[in-house]
Image (cartoon, rainbow, N blue to C red):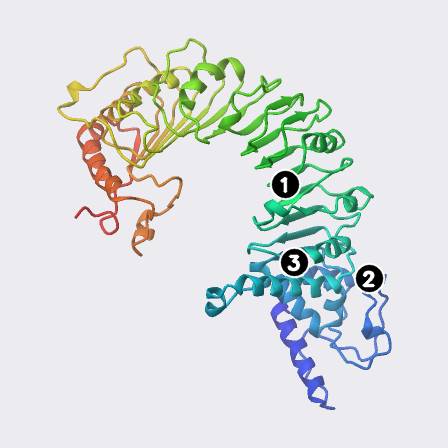
Amino acid sequence: MGLAELIIAMKKRRQQIQAGSSKPAKPTPGISIPSGSKRTRSSCEQDDYSQGTKTMRFSGPALPEDIWCHIHALLPLPDAARAACVSREFLHSWRCRPNLTFSQETLGVNLTFCERTLRTGEEKLALKFTKIVDEIMKKHTGVGVKTFKLQYCGSRIYTSRLKSWFKIAVNPGLEELVLSLPEVYDAKYYNFPSSLLFNGSGKSISYLNLKGCAFHPVAGLGCLRKLHLSRVHITGDELGCLLSNSLVLKELNLRQCNNITCLKIPCLLNQFNHLTVFGCKTLELIENKAPNLCTVHIDTTLVRLPFGDSLRVNNLEMLWAFEYNLVYYARANLPRIMPNLETLGISSAGEVLNTPIVTAKFLHLKLLEICLSVAEGAFSPAYDYLSLAFFLDACPVLETFKLSVWQTRMKHDPVSGDSSLLRKMPGHHHASIKNVKIDGFCSAKSMIELTCHILDNATSLENLKLDPIYDGGYEHADRLAVHEIGDCSPHTGRRMIREAHKAVLAIEKYIIGKVPSNVKLNIKKPCSQCHSVK
């Protein structure tokens, strides 16, 4: 029988017991209710119900212990807790539940409308959350826990109880540990009890994710493969100690860790291949000696830092942080610094300088994504989109090109006149490009020229997608379905909407006629309901 029917049968039996009925419940097909059966139980299963108490509980069908544990592990956390109240078997498996994830969503902890409007609302939420987790952890033995996640999304949490929870959860079999504390603790820095990890109890942890706390490691973790630290108070020497003694580490993600001035990745990390560094304001040096690092996501304020042996890097994403002319910098320098790049993503705060003509090429680059998240005053109205053709020309095996432009104020020279006035760049051949996507397509003359240039010279082109609406990455897989409820692009201003309609007219006049029959053209027009021009 199904799990739902099993729970219903348990509830019926419990109700009968509570009502004091002496008449046995009508048996449910597929469930046997032994009256005096005894089972061999592990140490983690000893409870008050096996110590002489007269409280009666439904013991459930005579299933093997591992089946009970598996069924119970499939239940959401609140349902698992409720099931433990009506079944002795579920109570035992609850005390050995392997995956514990505590968040407002999994616990169903919410505030009423009136509570949210009061200043004490967050205090009540924190107290309610803490009490529930505390009750759960007190009833758990800690045996068998493989995943422990505490993801609190409110403004505070009672940290006095955290260590007692970690003492229960951190055991030699724990594989994943996640702690996410509210941002308010940036100043106070709850001190994560590192000693619990390095006394042998954390030897099996493969994924460690800490956010909003202080962390002072004194050794390594032999099974650690992924380390994510966000807003964590840790020094470069402490991090270096952890890295040097975690020899199977594959991935390191650092965000807003502002006590690190030097990041050293030792050569002993033979499996290390993925590095993300973002918002670490005090970082002055990245020294990489890991032989197989191939993927780097990096804050653009760090791009110009010494980067050790970066020749092996295959995938690079440069994120913008008030850094301008990143496209210019990438074209001018990256072929020399990282010649083996296969994918490159650039997010620039603005471009004033046009793409330069440089002889060095990206001989292995197959995917190029350029995002111009343009702020006021950071983008030259005279910027020449057609100059990006020099970037494409430097990528002989490029297959996919994506361009996104998000301008808060559209300033450019709109296209006018007939197509004979558009500039052409003969001698450029992009023989490998198959897919081109331009979000934030506008009626700028140089953008029309770039698109026509690609149609003329990308001999292998298969797909061309043009979308005049770009709202900073808020994707809508099916725009029509979203538009029907009148909420398609909430970040789109009136000026961009007017520009989008101009862009569609430019596409119809200058581009549609140049699209070869073997190329699939996809134009995402503005919504008549949400993007109307009045």
Residue 206 versus residue 402 in the image, above or below: below
Q: Are marks 2 and 1 in contact (CB under 8 Å)?
A: no
Q: Secondary structure at mark 1?
A: loop
In the rendered structure, the answer to whether residue 478 lies left or right of residue 104 reads: left
If the image is split into quadrants, where does the N terminus sit? Answer: bottom right
Q: Position of residue 41 (x, y in %)?
A: 84, 65
Three-letter residue code for mark 1: Val
Q: Would you call the spot at circle 2 few (<14 residues within 10 Å), some (14-19), or many (20 or more)?
A: some
Q: Which residue is mark 2?
A: 44
Depth check: 215 or 106 in front?
215
Nearest to N terminus: mark 2 or mark 3: 2
Q: Which residue is mark 1?
A: 232
Q: Secondary structure at mark 2?
A: helix
Q: Would you call the spot at circle 3 few (<14 residues within 10 Å), some (14-19), or many (20 or more)?
A: few
In the rendered structure, the answer to whether residue 92 lies left or right of residue 303 reads: right
Q: Would you call the spot at circle 1 few (<14 residues within 10 Å), some (14-19), or many (20 or more)?
A: many
Q: Position of residue 479 (x, y in %)?
A: 33, 47
Q: CA distance from mark 2 to mark 1?
A: 35 Å
Nearest to N terminus: mark 3 or mark 1: 3
Q: Does residue 26 show up?
A: yes
Q: Quadrant of residue 359?
A: top left
Instruction: Report the disc number at residue 158.
Output: 3
Q: CA distance from mark 2 to mark 3?
A: 28 Å
Residue plotted at (65% across, 70% down) = 82
Residue 359 versus residue 440 in the image, above or below: above
Q: Secondary structure at mark 3?
A: loop
